[in-house]
Image (tube, grey):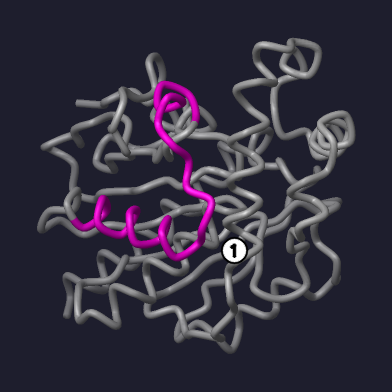
Amino acid sequence: MTISLAGKVATPGQWFHPAEPDPEARIRLLLFPHAGSGAIIYRDWSDLLPDDISAQAVTLPGRQERREEVAYTAWNSLVEGLYEAVLNELDDRPFAFFGHCLGAQLSYQLAVQMERDGLPVPLVVGMSGWAPKGFFNPTEEHINMPQEELVVWIKRLGSFPAEIYDNPEMLAMVVPALRADLSVAAQRVDEGATVPCPLVSYGGRNDPLQEEDDAFESWLPRSPQHLGHREYSGGHFFIDRHADAVTQDFCGHLYRQLDALQRN
């Protein structure tokens, strides 16, 4: 049985979509979106994933069907709230994390915290569109830039569907969530922590947020089992075009790690 990520994305107070995982799946996969967005960015993934991998995507407060809720603007508070939600969601099945940009930052922090608390950690974490060194970090100037400048910036990144940029009502929903997430990301402090599980990374060859050519190499000393880096044509949102290739590669790593776990 496959539970779709399409359709209505979340209800107030609901962190994950779908709300319930597939009870027959062998592996749980939690998906974390980029700044300003929610579960909708992974709406096509349920059609790309095998039936035995149950995916649930996160929607943070302050966007989509949770837009009436107050968005987090502080890193520590968001991590604390999301950590509690993740722990309440997981069961005894193996699980994995995949995140893009801010979602990758959150996935990384959650996995580190789980090890510190002596809890089971993901089979694999997938880091997309971000690395701990050599990537753009927002500042107060970015957070507070006038809306016209902010819209030009997100247009260049290709963050949202084209119809949003000329729709004042849509912008009124998107921009506050984006500012909140930029504020969150600006407060993240890099502790140089080691990822407690295998890690694979993905990037776009022309990502304007990647400031150093060797940025993804910064994962090497932080992962006990680095599974490699994959690059694809495109910019920061390469995963929109290459979702099929990314999911196939990531699922291959998931199955290999599950097999190794079962052998041990």
Residue closest to the eye, 5 or 112 = 112
Residue 113 percent coordinates (x, y) = 34, 74
Residues rendered magenta in the picture: 63-87
Q: Which quadrant does the N terminus fall into?
A: top left
Residue at (73% x, 12% y) in the render: 168
Q: Is residue 1 left or right of residue 67?
A: left
Look at the magenta stretch and give its main secondary structure. helix
- Picture quadrant of residue 122: bottom left
Q: Which residue does the numbered mark 1 point to in the structure image?
A: 201
- In the displayed structure, 58 sits above or below 73; it is above
Q: Amino acid at mark 1?
A: Ser
Residue closest to the eye, 187 or 87 = 187
Residue at (64% x, 66% y) in the render: 229
- In the displayed structure, 37 sits above or below 189; it is above
Q: Magenta segment: does it hold 205?
A: no
Residue at (71% x, 42% y) in the render: 238
Q: Magenta segment: does it hold 83?
A: yes
Q: Which quadrant does the C terminus fall into?
A: bottom left
- Picture quadrant of residue 149: top right
Residue 243 percent coordinates (x, y) = 58, 38
